[in-house]
Amino acid sequence: MKFAFVQRHATEHAVNTLCRVLQVSKAGYYAWTQRAPSARAAADAVLSERIHVIHTASRRTYGSPRVHAELAAQGQAHGVNRIARLMRRHDWRAKTRRRRCVTTDSRHAQPIAPNVVDRQFAIAPTTAVDTTWVGDITYLPTREGFLYLAIVLDLASRHVIGWAMRHTLEGAITYDALMMAIARRRPGAGLVHHSDRGSQYAAHAYRALLA
């Protein structure tokens, strides 16, 4: 109903503007607000409160079908379309879970280096830089899909010294990040480089660059 729309948005926009856009009378709107709610409106208000309780308890993950099922389990018979209408009215939407992205594929036949670091990532402040590097891949959700980011971190300084970004998880992303780190820092012999066992780090080209 147009008057109900004006009432819902009166705190966001001027009533004059809303009535003009919807082509309704301002006097008619104020007369409508003084009327007692109809039995249907009163029932909708009660049902809306029950829907809100269920929706909030689900951490806003329930849409109208699951809210409908929960109400039915409580012995309350309401049409799913009516529930959907009331949820739209109050802008109660099901919060979708963000799709996870796997960046590590350790199911490969490439050789695996010994775990020299063994999770000892707390480097003493006196440790010289460019003695231990670590590499990892993460992803950034964007409107156009995932953007993958590979970094190389110096454990002593905690500085990112090499990075690369791509739209795919091909092995070159880690290779490019390591190439940047080497070009910027020119480490000496004996550098320890730690990463996960993913195929990007176990690839022949990456191992050859480390060697």
Image: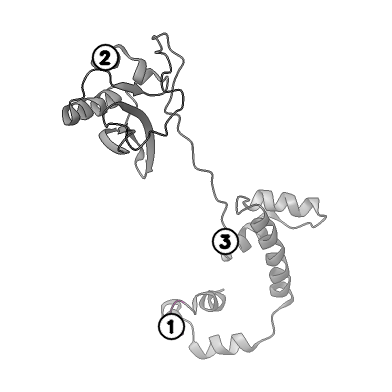
Q: Quadrant of residue 209?
A: top left
Q: Quadrant of residue 127?
A: top left
Residue type of the residue flagged with mark 1: Ala
Separation of residues labelled 1 and 3 (CA atoms)? 22 Å
Residue at the (51%, 78%) spot, across then down: 6
> Which comes sooner in the sequence, label 2 or label 3?
3
Q: Is residue 7 above or below residue 140?
A: below
Counting from the top left corner in percent of width and height, residue 115 is at 43, 18
Q: Which secondary structure, mark 3?
A: helix
Q: Determine whether the residue tagged by mark 1 lies in a helix, strand or loop.
A: loop
Task: Give amino acid for label 2.
Answer: Ala
Tag 2 residue: 205
> Which residues, given as a range, are shown in magenta?
12-16
Q: Which of pointers 2 and 3 indicates the residue nearer the eye?
A: 2
Q: Nearer the viewer, mark 2 or mark 1?
A: 2
Q: Residue at x 43, y 12 (%)?
A: 108
Q: Which residue is mark 3?
A: 88
